[in-house]
């Protein structure tokens, strides 16, 4: 049974999307982020027990509030797991360790890539039938999706997080460790007002 870890923060003004908030205000940024949580979770619903040759469990991997705070989205996840303290690498490592203790493969996404959909996630899990690792490259040099087919010791070690070189460094680590990798199509994360405006232009241009 595959596991999809969805990283999300409670949408408190001033605590989420701070770079976006610098341009549009913390209240507006938090309101948008709240909408994105629902949008992304709605888009992953086809994976729940209907794909991948079996049931996929959607885990809300949360931070910035109590589990009760996330109750509005209870129907969209199979279970909630709190994120531990630490940097992104610590939180990824803990989430993947816990998930791999229950199941393989494991894929993680965030809630700031609005170009995610169920077919793209299915492609990620299919890639893990053939490879050790899958990445969804983000346009800013990071990634909007990461997955592993099995527990890979050291997989999250010494990676520069939230950097234009995050993906490149992680690919180098995979090469040094002889882990096979597949890349999905690039997508845009929304971190700044420029990202948000570019996303809106793309939506407006869609047929």
Image (cartoon, rainbow, N blue to C red):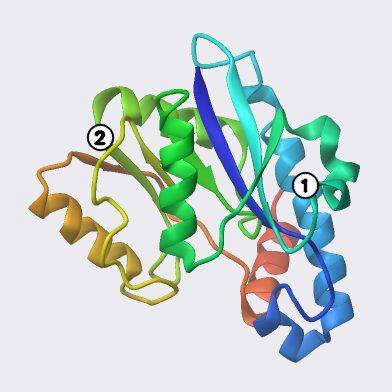
Q: Residue lying at the far front in this picture: please name it.
A: 85
Label 2: which secondary element: loop
Label 1: which secondary element: helix
- Residue 1 appears in the figure: yes
Do labels 2 and 1 touch, CB within 8 Å? no
Q: State which quadrant residue 152 falls in.
A: top left
Q: Position of residue 100 (x, y in %)?
A: 41, 31
Between 128 and 70, which is closer to the camera in this rendering? 70
Q: Position of residue 92 (x, y in %)?
A: 45, 53
Tell me how far mark 2 sits from mark 1, CA to CA.
29 Å
Q: Residue at x 25, y 35 (%)?
A: 132
- Using the image, tell me which numbered label, if any, was put on residue 39: 1
Q: Residue at x 64, y 14 (%)?
A: 49
Between 204 and 40, which is closer to the camera in this rendering? 40
Q: State which quadrant residue 84 falls in.
A: bottom right
Residue labelled with disc 2: 132
Q: Residue at x 75, y 83 (%)?
A: 21
Q: Where is 162 relative to 186, above or below?
A: below
Question: In the picture provided, is 11 more to the left or to the right than 167?
Answer: right
Q: Position of residue 204 (x, y in %)?
A: 75, 61
Few, some or many C-alpha atoms within 10 Å of disc 2 (few <14, some 14-19, many ≥20)? many
Q: Where is 157 relative to 195, above or below?
A: above
Q: Residue lying at the far top in this picture: please name it.
A: 53
Disc 2 vs disc 1: which is toward the camera? 2
Q: Position of residue 190 (x, y in %)?
A: 62, 68
């Amino acid at each position: 049974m595959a596991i999809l870890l969805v990283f999300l923060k409670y949408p408190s003004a001033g605590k989420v999307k701070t770079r976006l908030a610098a341009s549009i205000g913390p209240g507006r940024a938090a309101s948008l982020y709240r909408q994105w949580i629902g949008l992304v979770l709605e888009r992953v619903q086809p994976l729940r027990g209907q794909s991948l040759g079996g049931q996929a469990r959607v885990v809300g991997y949360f931070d910035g509030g109590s589990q009760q705070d996330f109750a509005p989205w209870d129907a969209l996840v199979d279970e909630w797991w709190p994120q531990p303290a630490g940097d992104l690498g610590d939180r990824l490592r803990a989430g993947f360790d816990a998930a791999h203790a229950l199941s393989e493969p494991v894929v993680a996404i965030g809630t700031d890539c609005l170009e995610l959909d169920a077919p793209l996630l299915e492609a990620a899990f299919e890639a893990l039938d053939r490879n050790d690792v899958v990445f969804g490259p983000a346009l800013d040099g990071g990634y909007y999706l990461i997955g592993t087919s099995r527990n890979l010791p050291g997989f999250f070690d010494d990676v520069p997080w939230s950097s234009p070189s995050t993906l490149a460094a992680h690919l180098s680590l995979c090469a040094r460790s002889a882990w096979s990798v597949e890349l999905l199509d690039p997508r845009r994360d929304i971190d700044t007002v420029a990202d948000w405006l570019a996303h809106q232009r793309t939506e407006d241009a869609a047929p």
